[in-house]
Amino acid sequence: MSSQNPVFIPGPTNIPEEIRKACFIPTLDHRSPDFARILNPCLDGVRRVLKSKDAHVFIFPSTGTGGWETALTNTLSKGDRVLAARNGMFSHRWIDMCQRHGLDVQVVEAAWGEGIPADRYADILAADTGHRIKVVLATHNETATGVRSDIAAVRKALDDAGHPALLFVDGVSSIGSMDFRMDEWGVDVAVTGSQKGFMLPAGLAIVGFSEKAMAATKTANLPRTFFDVRDMEGAYAKNGFPYTPPVGLMNGLKLALGMIKEEGLENVFARHHRIAEGVRRAVAAWGMTPCARTPELYSDTVTAVVVPEGFNGTDVVTRAAKTYGVAFGVGLGEVAGKVFRIGHLGSLTDVMMLSGLATAEMVMADLGYPVTLGSGVAAAQEYYRHGGKTHAIAAE
Ligand SMILES: *Cc1c(COP(=O)(O)O)cnc(C)c1O
């Protein structure tokens, strides 16, 4: 793999040079006021990206998976019922974690390529008149299939049923890249990590808790120590951590949040949408389709491209790495071999994306796909050169 080439995996993402430098700072005393100057801008900046006025933000040395565990163990007790949909590998893994913690998970199965079936959530919540369901889980962006679900619709299902369950959203591959509205959607715990929209190396679990979720921490009895948000909150009050903080990564996060603010959060979302739309036009020009079943489900951070019958998507990824030194994502779980994934999030430009599309075309031509070199690139170029404002395709 060439270190000069950008990566096109859906996380970890490309790291801007200045962020890489910000992560690599000399040791500083994390009990000194210097650390407060890193910690507090991180907490404020994350709150801004979550679009929350006063969420309790916590940053743990961990990854997104640790963020899931933080959400569950701080708010739930053994045997509590949780409602979850399984429509891809990441929602599946969160369900698995619930089960391993002794929670009673009511699983709604959905096709891989579909979004969260909010209508089925609505029926289940309306029928749960005894309010046994304590938490509703939602994976905002299924990174395995490139499907973005409608979190506002899940909120509406809860509200229409007058159901008091908490709403936990996995936004690991959406937050900081696609619009996320913690307050407006009534999200009680938002989960993300450092290595996707925040353009950092892996190593931080980043979560936001609502007041209602904080109240649940008082009665929850699942075992927790490292991920106890009460310890974290107590330490933050003194500008510190309950243990040694990952100072370098947090210094990088501070810079990343500043870069997002400078570009403008809505501009960041618009850039992700434009780049993603170029990818989708390329996929269409190849005569192929995204795994996401309908356009309103299309993710702006990752596209899982369904390969034609008789081809194996994993071969695309293997050959791209070996022959051209470029990384794409393999299909996971149920869609293993059936798709290859193009990650298009984080630090990325139209020009970088064109190189990824050109590489995918070379690989597919090498493997005998019925793809004309330049066809997808041209479709994306036509879109990008008008700043994504072309009217050539009526659906826009
Ligand atoms: C990347 C990702 C995760 C977390 O993965 P980690 O490797 O633990 O950071 C969780 N959910 C989704 C949707 C993801 O894309």
Image: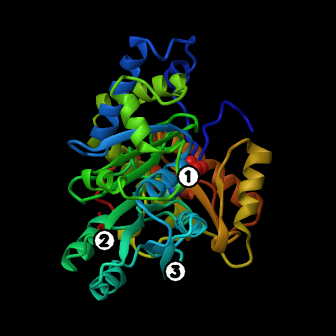
Type of amino acid under label 1: Thr
Q: Are marks 3 and 2 in contact (CB under 8 Å)?
A: no
What residue is disc 1 on?
65
User: Closer to the observer: label 1 or label 2?
Assistant: 1
Q: Quadrant of residue 329?
A: bottom right
The residue nearer to you, when weighing 235 against 13, is 235
Judge the density around disc 3: few (<14), some (14-19), many (≥20) Cα neighbours within 10 Å. Answer: some
Q: Work out how far the residue at label 3 is from the one at label 1, CA to CA, in angstroms.
A: 23 Å
Lower sequence index among marks 3 and 2: 3
The residue nearer to you, when weighing 206 against 12, is 206
What residue is disc 3 on?
111
Lower sequence index among marks 3 and 1: 1
In the figure, 306 relative to 269: above or below?
A: below
Residue 378 in sight in this render = no
Judge the density around disc 1: few (<14), some (14-19), many (≥20) Cα neighbours within 10 Å. Answer: many
Q: Quadrant of residue 171?
A: bottom left
Residue at x-position 63% and y-position 56%: 373
Q: Are marks 3 and 1 in contact (CB under 8 Å)?
A: no
Residue 188 in sight in this render = yes
Type of amino acid under label 3: Ala
User: Ligand 1 closer than 8 Å to the CB at disc 3?
Assistant: no
Residue 250: image location, x then y, percent = 47, 27
Residue at x-position 24% and y-position 60%: 185
User: Closer to the observer: label 3 or label 1?
Assistant: 1
| Mark seen at residue 154 | 2
Q: Work out how far the residue at label 1 is from the one at label 2, CA to CA, in angstroms.
A: 22 Å
226 to the left or right of 275:
right
In the figure, 78 relative to 386: above or below?
A: below
225 to the left or right of 299:
right
> Under tag 3, what secondary structure?
loop
> Under tag 1, what secondary structure?
helix
